[in-house]
Amino acid sequence: MLTRIITALDKKETNKKVYNFLIILIAAFPLIGMRTETYIITAWCLFSIILTFKTRSYNLVLKDKKSFLILNSYYLMALLSFFIFSLDSHQALKDLETKALFIIFPTIFYFSQDFINKKTLGRALLSFASSNIVLAAYVWVIIFKKGFMGMLKLDHHYNPVFRNVFSNTTQVHLPYLGLLFGFSCVIMIHFLLKNKTHHIFKIIISFSIFLLLFSMTIFSARMAIFATIISSLMLFRSLNKKQIMIGLASVSIIVLILFFLPPSKRRISELSQTEFVLPNKTQSSQNVNFRYGIYYCSMEVLKSNWLFGLGLGNVQKQLDQCYQGFDYENFDDFGVQKYNSHNQYLNAWLTFGILGLGVFVYFLYYSFSKTTILHKSFLVLSLLALLTENLFEREIGVMLFTFFNTLFFVSTRKIKST
């Protein structure tokens, strides 16, 4: 058995196929789940390291040291903060573990980029989009078994049945699930615009886009919907009038659904009726402006820590101390739930200080240079999401961004250089 493995590793084409197959499996993480995904990523890393030393492809990093360092800069900054500023080493180590893919994907992709071919990126995108379509379809099978109309009648603020079904079935926090579905929509829209396909495939893809958008609407991923629309419209910039009209018509339909479908209509209504008042005991849950309270405390903590930041693992405790000043009490109050800053830029500033925020912004900006329109659409989707979510504080958010951002970055430059 060992002899066969060694013999197989001597065949470059076989190595490429195995390497690319593992990437395709990694891209299917929404369906596979993060636990199983950990084993696949580990296998891919080990296989890539073997190939790297076997082919001496680590020399490729020396050709583009600047890009390599910039793509690793966010994690290196977190490491530096851990050793210098962190007071809570246990929480800081958990944060480093969550963010580990920020150094794993750039390092491994750069070392093994010789095994990435022109089809790698496309197949990974197809795997990702397909896994989200299957996941959404599975949830809808459960919904229809329970009875869609009956669930529609039961759905309200204190019993968001659709949100619960999507959350419990997928085991993904809904704002993040919205981003997974949203990027899948962007991928399929790009495919429809750039490729000539049979009408049957166009119908299947169009239905898949509708399924994902409708899912996002029914569980009310508001920022994900907005970010998906904006990033999708970027794909229409160089198209003819007919294609632009189709795009605008699609956006109009989505907006109409948002305003008339009860679950999303309720969420929009809640948003419009929420006052800019700090959480207090006179309010019921549906009237509390949680984000106003969160941003208020974030800015209060920032006032005395804007220059150097608090350090990795120290931010949440400071926010919790500020939240104690709110006398609001309910099932979702600040003593029961752990509310982070809900803004990744703000979190970077709170954690690393003003210089760290600058490094973080430059790290994001650098990815925009000399890349494809689909990569830019993905970045716009991510950058908008970072305004309302700490995307890089959860494994699945880190997974989504680091995997595709690095793969886009490396494959685009490799194709241009060949």
Image (cartoon, helix red, strand yellow):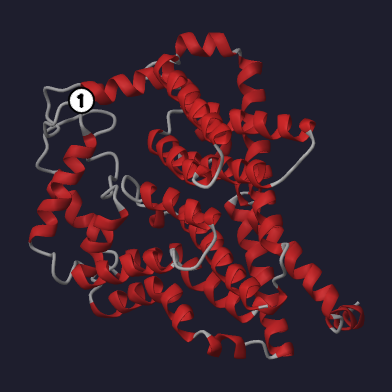
Q: Secondary structure at mark 1?
A: loop
Q: Is residue 306 visible?
A: yes
Judging depth in this view, the residue of 293 and 369 nearest the camera is: 369
Reply above or below: 325 against 146. Answer: below
Q: How many marks?
A: 1
Residue 309 coordinates in the image, percent (x, y)? 19, 67
Q: Quadrant of residue 223?
A: top left
Residue at position x 68%, y 84% in the image: 52
Q: Is residue 314 visible?
A: no
Judging depth in this view, the residue of 325 and 24 nearest the camera is: 24
Reply above or below: 215 against 99. Answer: above
- Quadrant housing the C terminus: bottom right
Residue 80 coordinates in the image, percent (x, y)? 31, 79
Reply above or below: 100 against 192. Answer: below
Residue 334 coordinates in the image, percent (x, y)? 22, 39
Residue at position x 71%, y 66% in the image: 118
- Asked if residue 283 lies left or right of residue 36, the reply is left
- Asked if residue 328 lies left or right of residue 213, the reply is left
Residue at position x 49%, y 68% in the image: 370
* Residue closest to the far front: 241
The amino acid at mark 1 is Thr
Residue ID for mark 1: 274
Residue 312 coordinates in the image, percent (x, y)? 29, 67
Q: Quadrant of residue 284?
A: top left
